[in-house]
Image: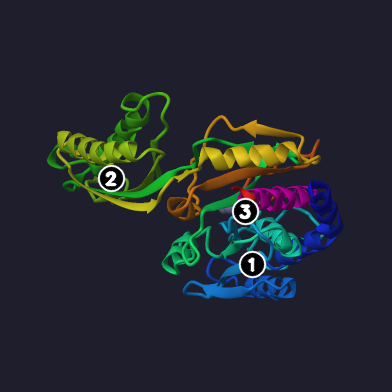
Amino acid sequence: MKELLAKRVREIAPEVVEWRRRIHRNPELSFQEFETSALIEEKLRSFGVDTIRRIGSSGTGICAELYGTGSGPGRCVGIRADIDALPIQEQSGVPYASTKDGIFHGCGHDSHAAILLGTARLLSEFRHTFSGCVKFFFQHAEEELGGGKEFMEAGVMENPHVDGVMALHALPDIYVGEIGVRDDFMTAGVDLLKIVVEGKQAHGGYPHYGVDTILAASTIVTALQSLGSRELAPTDCAFVTFGRIEGGISNSYIGGPVRLEGCIRYLRKTTQELFHRRVREIATSVGEGLRAKVSVEITPEMIPTCVDRKWVNRIRKVCADIDSVERVIDLPSPAMGGEDYAYFLEKAPGALFRLGVRTKGGPHCPTHSINFYVDDEAIPIGMEIMAAAALDALREE
Ligand SMILES: [Zn+2]
Ligand SMILES: [Zn+2]
């Protein structure tokens, strides 16, 4: 069985790589994945899946169901891939580069989509070996966030109820043949932060007649850095980052309003609560100490992804049996970016693992960079892990 699956992976790999290249050449931004989803739907139909449903406001997400025709406990497993691209100009130099100006699969979602298509094909060929259902989630709009939520609103985790989910994400920090896992948090929760500092205008030569908002705002920025390093256990991770400051009047006038925009990144719910409270307290008291008026607005944007140890162990187990997987690495820390696969994991236990995509001896091409690169050799590895893990879960008594 294991050998049969490995053989089919090798046989279909060139075709799956071709699908990946087709998607790569024609990248589409969040909520605009029209041709990508059309290609996915066409392929899914050719594999003979049982249902295909369009998801979301743009209709560019796809949820497909495949029912087993064999015997077994009748479980339901969900597998998710994101499919959207980024507003970046590609400079990777690959022969199958993006044909669209300023749009690029710089996060590897082209390979995620192709891997899930390949997995769907494999599982459709092996459907006589299990009972129950596999749901394939081709999720639109991960980069802009919103697609994951629309999948939840569409009720994809019910009817039939999904017992477990999995997803992978390309990681150029590790090599082809390497898989990265963690037993708890994989990505961070993100809350958006907006702080407005108001003071009193004055000529810069007479600062004592005004209230300097730039001084207050920059002191707030500095003071908030103490949260992560002084109010959090060193074993936890959370921090405040500002990505935008706007305000002031001119060289020689002070006191115009200043807006700070940033975010809070965290892992644990208790840490999120601590940061919400302390960001308000510090910003307000530091501002008031400098005679400024401060308002703070915090908007939750994304919850953390927390995986299930049993599911991660399943990934470890199937990887041990796959020849092309050279090693499974326990990643030392979560990625502190957001990932809306978190919504799937909120509804069912599951795994998220990192697929090594860096060419051995090749350069490091970071995620979201202009030269981001996925080595094609990683694609059959991802497919085999997904298919083997799904079969393992479907057959579990
Ligand atoms: Zn991304
Ligand atoms: Zn991504």
Colouring scheme applied when the structure was drawn: rainbow
Q: From this viewpoint, is residue 281 visible? A: yes
- Residue occupied by mark 1: 66
Tell me the quarter of the picture where residue 273 sits.
top left
Looking at the image, tell me whether mark 2 or mark 1 is earlier in sequence order.
1
Residues in magenta, as a range: 372-393
Q: Label 2 belongs to which residue?
A: 252
Dot 3 or dot 1: first in sequence order is 1
* Label 2 residue SS: loop
The residue mark sitting in front, 2 or 1, is 1
Q: In the figure, 29 relative to 336: above or below? A: below
256 versus 329 height, above or below: below
> Element at badge 1?
strand
What amino acid is labelled 3 in the image? Leu
- What SS does tag 3 mark? helix
Residue 8 or 118: which is nearer the viewer? 8
Q: Pointer 3: what residue?
A: 394
Name the residue located 51 percent from the left edge and 58 percent from the top edge. 162
